[in-house]
Amino acid sequence: MIYFTSDMHFFHERIIRHCGRPFRDALEMNEKIIQNWNNTVSPDDEVFLLGDVTMKGPEQAFAVLSRLTGKKYLVKGNHDYFVDNHAWKEYGWVFLWVKEYFELVVSNQKFVLFHYPIAEWTDFYKGAIHLHGHQHNPMVYNHQQKQAGVKRYDVGVDANIYKPVCIEDVIKFFG
């Protein structure tokens, strides 16, 4: 199975207040997101993280990422400085690859993966679905996009009850 997520912001205390997340502190938030992830994703599943894993360094990034099941790919966000830090290699590499942008085709459905929401994307007029994060939208955002006839979907944890989104659910959503 393939999953998507973004904007976990592990260890980020201020994101709780900024986004109105229902957690006392970053530790509780981290543990809930990890629990939700591991209850959803199996070890053989693939997960595309669309940025903003953590603003912390490689040691803390590895500590949390190594607890998450599945095969992980990172489409970098604006806060993922830890992947540029050469010290990262000391802790181990948890991603199969890291990119700025990626196009994925599954069962003849194209997905355009980018941290930021964009107005138009490759094959926009041919039915491609744009998956993004960055904005920390509420759940209603994805429904508003669909009602407006736009195949743009926020896979961020704030819009998806703090867990990864299954590719089949995204396809059904726009089906």
Image (cartoon, helix red, strand yellow):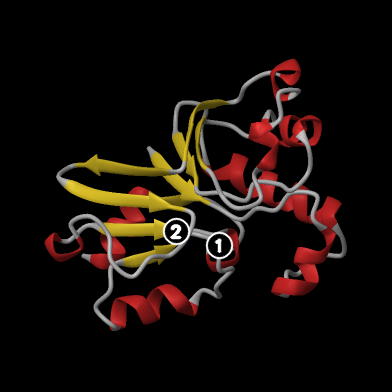
| Vertical comparison of 96 with 169: above or below | above
Q: Secondary structure at mark 2?
A: strand
Picture residue at 65% right of the left edge, 53% below the top: 8
Q: Position of residue 49 (x, y in %)?
A: 52, 44
Q: Residue at the spot x=72%, y=30% of the render? A: 62
Q: State if disc 2 and disc 1 touch (CB < 8 Å).
A: yes
Q: Residue at x 35, y 49 (%)?
A: 167
Residue 113 position, x and y percent, is 38, 50
On screen, residue 8 above or below 127: above
Depth check: give the residue in front, 11 or 90. Answer: 90
Label 2 Cα crowd, 10 Å radius (few <14 / some 14-19 / many 20+)? many
Quadrant in which the C terminus appears: bottom left
Which secondary structure, mark 1?
Answer: loop
Question: Separation of disc 1 and disc 2 at Cα?
Answer: 7 Å
Quarter of the image with the N terminus is top left
Residue 156's disc number: none
On screen, residue 63 versus residue 101, left or right, reads right
Q: Quadrant of residue 29?
A: bottom right
Residue appearing at x 58%, y 63% in the figure: 161
Question: For this view, does 126 lie left or right of residue 169?
Answer: left
Q: Foreground residue, 35 or 118?
A: 118
| Amino acid residing under circle 2 | His
Rendering coords of residue 31 (x, y %): 77, 47
At label 1, which amino acid type do we have? His
Pinpoint residue 160: horizontal percent, then vertical percent: 53, 63
Q: Is residue 106 left or right of residue 21?
A: left
Q: Which quarter of the picture shows residue 119?
A: bottom left
Q: Which residue is mark 1?
A: 134
To which residue does mark 2 refer?
132
